[in-house]
Image: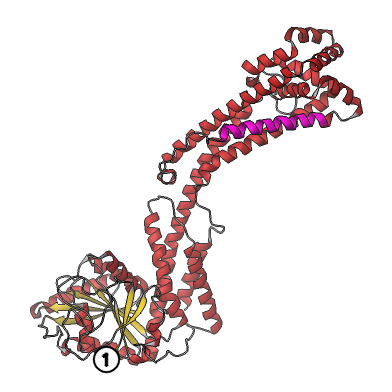
């Protein structure tokens, strides 16, 4: 049954309205940017950083943002501790009757139970704090109930809800939350215990005379010290003869770990009554302490500010570790990217070298070119002058167009083979380098990327034909002038195109000249032929444009191939320093609040 009480108007956290608004804007921006952080690479620190990011987001939602928006909300005292420490028994004793589960079966706290004064109900019935937990309204009963029922009707649905119990025995201004065991055998319970403790304004930490030095509780206590949270340590079931020694040792441990200001409450070993209740006197000092805190509104505000500021400072540290992990991810991704780009850039260099040193003019290309020009006849023509060469070639070209097409086909086949071979080499190198890196190995998984894509040969062939078509268009455009039109028409577009391709593949001196490579006189034939039609300067310009076009097309082909690697890399944040700046801003906020 819901209460009719409503909380007062929510007050800004601290300072002026403007500064409070700025603080909230900062925290909401931090939450938004942190939610977008992705750490997908398998790096040593990634798992811990992902958990830090999740914890930071949860603490923003569960505690920091709600508390900044409502500094005057009741304090939340979370009762936590080890398995069997007596947390539920302690809570029952604080209110004077059974309201939580206690017993020998572990874990006993199936769902967290939040006890509050009826006047404070409105602060907890909505999702102001712990928004991921649904609310269940529990009811008190005057009937005598066994410990296994605990006076509250509980849902059996794991730990996804928070049971609210209104009880006038709880002081107005402080709510008490009975949390699961911090070292529970249930993973869900352990996670929930951590979440609830992170949402607390103050901790009531329960341990026993024989468990107070356990590692798990102390890890959480050190976390409390980092948040500067108010802590009350309850040492339960202490034999009378050991009280002085045990309490002194525990106090020494607290002092050493920066928790010297923590309140220490001793509960002597004693028998429970029929309802599993401690004697009221056993918890009177703790009850009095809680009631005194609740009665002091100004004191509650100071406690809330202290915990809030400490939590924001701890948040800055968490985000700092996430920022460092993000930097490591970006550096690892950049390394994998660089390895890929290097492999394909080297392939590009080798392809271009093969297209300008005459290597492509061997074998089939050379044979088709010699078939096309008629090797003996053309070399004799060179000795007799370029004029007679033009006349003989013109007659040959007009009568035999098919051999020119064979030259184009041979060049396409040879160039395709070079590009495919070098692209495969690049893929093999990139795959090898990625698999040598844990992050790259994770991104590749079981997929083999060491060869070219299935459709790459067809794509390369189409790109080469497009280059050849553009080269023909260059010749057609160059031959539109009246003074060259007749000579261009006499030789034919395919013949001139074949000649220009041979010239392009024999360029060993860049774009400053048309020196010939290994094909020797074969390339001279094409060069002199083109010069006879267009002139030396025009031929140099045509060859430069054709080579630049081929270079761009080769680069585009390899760029598309390397995407199978690069597309697996995580996106780089637009603002890499964003989280680091948030760390600085949060630190200033905690220091100046």
Reply above or below: 47 against 15: above
Looking at the image, which residue sits at the far left? Answer: 241
Magenta run includes residue 468: yes
Residue indicated by mark 1: 169
Please name the predominant secondary structure of the magenta segment in the image.
Answer: helix
Count residues near mark 1 (Cα–Cα under 10 Å), then give few for <14, some for 14-19, many for 20+: some
Q: Quadrant of residue 491?
A: top right
Classify residue 593 as left or right of residue 189: right
317 vs 245, nearest the viewer: 317
Q: Secondary structure at mark 1?
A: loop
Quadrant of the frame with the N terminus: bottom left
**Could you say where residue 74 lies in the image, as x and y percent from the top left?**
37, 86
**Could you say where residue 250 lies in the image, as x and y percent from the top left?**
20, 74
Classify residue 468 as left or right of residue 481: left
**The residue stretch that appears in magenta:** 455-476
Classify residue 426 as left or right of residue 553: left
């Amino acid at each position: 049954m819901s209460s009719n009480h409503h909380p007062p108007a929510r007050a800004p956290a601290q300072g002026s309205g403007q500064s409070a608004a700025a603080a909230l804007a900062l925290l909401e921006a931090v939450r938004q940017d942190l939610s977008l952080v992705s750490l997908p690479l398998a790096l040593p620190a990634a798992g811990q950083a992902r958990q830090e990011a999740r914890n930071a987001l949860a603490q923003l939602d569960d505690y920091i943002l709600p508390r900044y928006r409502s500094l005057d909300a009741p304090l939340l005292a979370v009762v936590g501790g080890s398995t069997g420490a007596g947390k539920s028994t302690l809570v029952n004793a604080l209110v004077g009757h059974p309201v939580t589960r206690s017993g020998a079966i572990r874990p006993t706290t199936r769902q967290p139970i939040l006890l509050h004064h009826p006047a404070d109900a409105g602060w907890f019935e909505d999702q102001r704090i712990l928004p991921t937990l649904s609310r269940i309204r529990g009811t008190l009963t005057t009937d005598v109930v066994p410990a296994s029922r605990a006076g509250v009707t509980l849902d059996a649905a794991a730990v996804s809800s928070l049971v609210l119990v209104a009880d006038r025995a709880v002081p107005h201004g402080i709510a008490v939350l009975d949390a699961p065991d911090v070292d529970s055998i249930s993973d869900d319970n352990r996670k929930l215990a951590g979440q609830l403790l992170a949402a607390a304004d103050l901790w009531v930490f329960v341990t026993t005379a024989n468990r107070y030095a356990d590692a798990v509780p102390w890890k959480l206590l050190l976390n409390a010290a980092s948040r500067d949270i108010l802590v009350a340590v309850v040492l339960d079931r202490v034999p009378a003869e050991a009280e002085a020694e045990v309490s002194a040792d525990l106090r020494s441990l607290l002092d050493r770990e920066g928790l010297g200001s923590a309140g220490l409450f001793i509960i002597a070993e004693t028998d429970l009554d029929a309802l599993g209740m401690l004697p009221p006197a056993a918890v009177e000092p703790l009850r009095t302490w809680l009631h005194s805190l609740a009665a002091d509104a100004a004191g509650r505000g100071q406690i809330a500010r202290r915990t809030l500021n400490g939590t924001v400072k701890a948040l800055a540290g968490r985000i700092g570790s996430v920022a460092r992990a993000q930097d490591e991810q970006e550096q690892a991704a950049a390394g994998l990217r660089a390895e890929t780009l290097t492999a394909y850039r080297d392939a590009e260099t080798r392809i271009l070298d093969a297209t300008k040193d005459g290597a492509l003019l061997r074998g089939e290309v050379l044979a088709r070119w010699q078939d096309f020009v008629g090797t003996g006849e053309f070399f004799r023509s060179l000795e007799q002058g370029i004029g007679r060469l033009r006349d003989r070639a013109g007659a040959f070209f007009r009568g035999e167009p098919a051999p020119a097409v064979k030259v184009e086909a041979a060049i396409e086949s040879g160039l395709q083979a070079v590009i495919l071979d070098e692209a495969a080499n690049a893929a093999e190198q990139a795959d090898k380098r990625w698999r040598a890196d844990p992050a790259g190995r994770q991104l590749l998984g079981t997929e083999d990327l060491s060869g070219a894509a299935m459709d790459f040969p067809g794509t390369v062939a189409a790109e080469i034909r497009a280059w050849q078509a553009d080269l023909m268009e260059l010749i057609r455009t160059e031959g539109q002038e009246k003074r060259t039109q007749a000579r261009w028409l006499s030789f034919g577009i395919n013949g001139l195109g074949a000649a220009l391709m041979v010239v392009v593949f024999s360029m060993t001196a860049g774009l400053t000249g048309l020196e010939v490579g290994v094909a020797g006189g074969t390339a001279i034939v094409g060069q002199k032929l083109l010069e006879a039609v267009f002139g030396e300067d025009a031929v140099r310009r045509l060859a430069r444009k054709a080579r630049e076009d081929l270079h761009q097309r080769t680069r585009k082909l390899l760029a598309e191939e390397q995407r199978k690697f690069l597309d697996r890399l995580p996106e780089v944040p637009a603002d890499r320093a964003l989280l680091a700046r948030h760390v600085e801003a949060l630190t200033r906020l905690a220091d100046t609040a």
